[in-house]
Amino acid sequence: MFNASDYDALLQRLEQFFVETSQKKAITSGLAPEELQAQINLALPEQGESLEQLQQAIDAYLQYSVKTAHPAYFNQLWGGFDPTCFMGDMLTSAANTSMYTHEVAPVATLIEKTLIAKMGELVGFSHPEGQFTTGGSNGNLMALAIARHRACPDLRKTGMAQAPRLIALVSAESHYSFSKAAHLLGLGTDNLWKVPADATGRMRVDALEGLIAAAKAQGAHPFFIAGTAGTTVRGAYDPFEAIAAIAQREKLWFHIDGAWGASVLLSPKHRHLMQGSELADSVVWDAHKMMGMTLMCSVLLVKQRGMMLNTFSTEDTGYIFHESEADPIDLGPSTMHCGRRVDAVKLWLTWKHLGDRGWAQRIEHYFELAAHAEAMIREHPNLALVTPRYSLNICFQYVPEKNEDSLAQRNLLTLNIRQALLDSGKVMVNYAQVEDKTIFRLVLCNNQSTKAEVTDFLAEIIALGNSLSRSD
Ligand SMILES: Cc1ncc(COP(=O)(O)O)c(C=O)c1O
């Protein structure tokens, strides 16, 4: 049995890790898998190891992990560090349980329901139901399953062989999880139709109308449309009100994938980006992205109560669910999961600590950082935005002084600058493709970052760009 001083030693080691991270030690070791393997004793021994030996494993894990709470970690749609979330995570592990029944998770069930009500209210749903899920991808999968069940309830029994040709529509800039979901649900990726986006990355409503008409003309049955709140690369928000009007007229399930961007609902200043969210049938919202919770912390919210239970309840569950079938307090029957980790407690504890006001300040701080980065990029002759900024994603390129460089050279320069940044360990930023351009996708959602890191980051890009383009 470990005692408190053993845990204390670990906590002190973790504190040291956080301090080193905030002192801007290298973000990543950049070691190749073989090199890393040579540094760490990965073998699982026959004879168990002592706590002292485990200490070495812990040290190695921390040393070679990417420092995602580093203030210049801009690589993903998540990052930073939240002490109350960390405490909530420990609490979750200490009182280890599963979210499926009230019987084994009495407090966590009530906490999860409290958060669903609060987040649903922010979306604009008056009596929402919902569940924490294991991520936005699975939330999108579940939304598609609910929509299919509403369209063709018999399919749960008969399978897709008996189905009409069902068409789901998503934006061309939507997340790849919809393709996986179409595959896994047996709809087929050929029946996931991608609605073209305009030049700024928003779904084209005229094209949506055209595709629905085309599907019907082929005798197919369009049943689902997803808009995105904060697209993965450009951070764009689709025109939800216009999409909702079409969905209503055509009797389509209207889902919003707000995995990245629904968190703007927390800011009175920026929530207008979600205008029309109350018209959706379902919304996915990842709290592990813009809200900075540890992974995973994701919610699927559904406007009409009962839809989740109708879709996911099944037979042969009497061994575990002893509640009445009609309106069970147990969350398990209304989800695709059986055992599920408690992801709500860390969010609940953090929300209690920050309050609504604290969240608003946090989101507004990110928007200020993003506006600062955008202004610097617009002002500097060697930097160019490649698409308008909607939210916290800033997509840009370095433009060499001798501007006659071809697009192919500029694209290569993005990759070379990024590699040099990774090698330096000072900054971690990702790249992506916007049309034919390879761009830096700067994402500002790290609560450790300030304007200073953003300024230094752009200065570093310019310096590296100058030196790498001269050495061509
Ligand atoms: C718009 C969007 N939807 C869904 C996802 C998937 O979320 P998760 O990683 O929580 O499965 C992402 C991930 O980046 C995303 O950007």
Image (cartoon, rainbow, N blue to C red):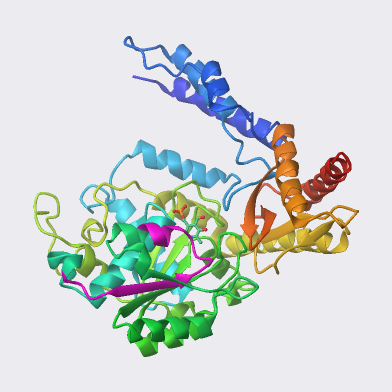
In this view of the protein, which residue sits in the foreground, 266 or 274?
Answer: 274
Q: Is residue 265 left or right of residue 465?
A: left
352 relative position to 213: left or right: right
Residue 365: x %, y % from top left: 69, 60
Examine the rendered structure and indicate whether residue 319 appears above or below residue 197.
above
Q: Quadrant of the C terminus?
A: top right
Residue 167 is one of the magenta-drawn residues:
yes
The residue positioned 61% from the left and 76% from the top of the image is: 198
Q: In the shown orientation, is residue 188 left or right of residue 6?
A: left
Residue under the point 63% across and 62% down: 363
Query: Percent position (x, y) of residue 254?
Result: 40, 77
The quadrant the N terminus occupies is top left
- Magenta residues (range): 162-180
Question: At 45% from the left edge and 71% from the top edge, which residue is drawn?
Answer: 170
387 w.r.t. 26: above or below: below
Q: Is residue 308 magenta?
A: no
Residue in front for this viewpoint, 244 or 310: 244
**Of the pair 73 and 53, the residue shown nearer to us:** 73
Residue 347 x, y percent position in the rendering: 46, 53
Q: Answer with the quarter of the image where residue 359 lies.
A: bottom right
